[in-house]
Image (spheres, helix red, strand yellow):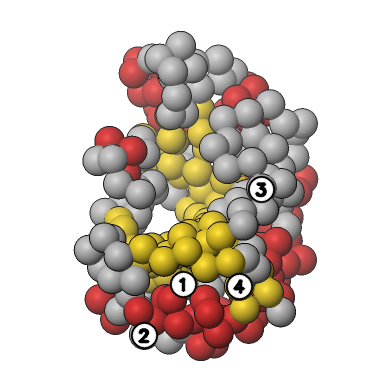
Amino acid sequence: MDAFVMEIFSSVQGEGPLVGCRQIFLRFAGCNLDCAYCDTPGDMRPAHCRSQNALDGKDLAFCKNPLNAGQVVAAVERLKPSMHHSISLTGGEPLLQSEFLLEILPLIKDTRLGVYLETNGTLTGQLESVIGMVDFIAMDIKLPGVSGLPPMWEKHRKFLAAAVQKKVFVKVVVGGKTGEEEFIQAVQLVAGIADLPLIIQPVTGSRSMRPEPARLLYLQERALDFLSDVRVIPQVHKMLELL
Ligand code: SF4
């Protein structure tokens, strides 16, 4: 089996409670959604995968897509998994490649704490097929007011109910126009499953799209009525101009 891969590189996690942890990122192309703020179009099929050959990031290779499992595992091995917290499966939506993940994950063994899945939280069947090989799940709940997508509450609820057996946290991206009602609906959805960590992530983009700091604090206060661990964390890798 082959997969379209955009990038394979070593960097620090820039979002959520594991911010700052060193990871190997395996960024897959393609997504089943089309969020208004997305910087990786869902139908993108890059001709080449860009991968680091060494940890300093200066030696880059460009491999023709799609890649087979052996090529991906070899590229990951070159980046010394043993010095990394975990391997981050990201995208796009990595669960679109669940059959490919079933091939490669048993072959990537040496990270310190395992496999970290970043997902839009909609593909429950695919999650169930790989969940035995995943250690951390970073799941989005998409708020219609900021993502521009139709509501997906039931899809997210079903996904989170399956994900909760692992170390899971939920992220909601909020913008300047995020309504309190949809935000609280997301918070209550999480609280209805378990008292899980919730990350409020201000949207990255033009100043007019971003929420006011006071608004972020207010939304955090509201969420703390339902959940015990609610954090406001921006995308740190963009501040540091990291990959
Ligand atoms: S889920 Fe992520 S990759 Fe997919 S369209 Fe939305 S922001 Fe982009």
Query: Mark 2 is on which residue type?
Result: Asp
Q: Nearer the viewer, mark 3 or mark 2?
A: 3
Ranked by sequence position, the earlier of labels 4 and 3 is 3
Circle 3/circle 2 CB separation < 8 Å: no
Q: Which residue is mark 1?
A: 115
Q: Position of residue 165 (x, y in %)?
A: 57, 69
Q: Which residue is mark 4?
A: 67
Residue 131 versus residue 205: which sits nearer the camera? 205
Ligand 1 within 8 angstroms of badge 1 C-beta: no
Answer yes or no: is residue 71 visible: yes
Q: Nearer the viewer, mark 1 or mark 3?
A: 3
- Which quadrant of the frame does ligand 1 lie within? top right
Ranked by sequence position, the earlier of labels 1 and 2 is 2
Local SS, label 4: strand
Where is 96 relative to 36, above or below? below
Ranked by sequence position, the earlier of labels 4 and 2 is 4
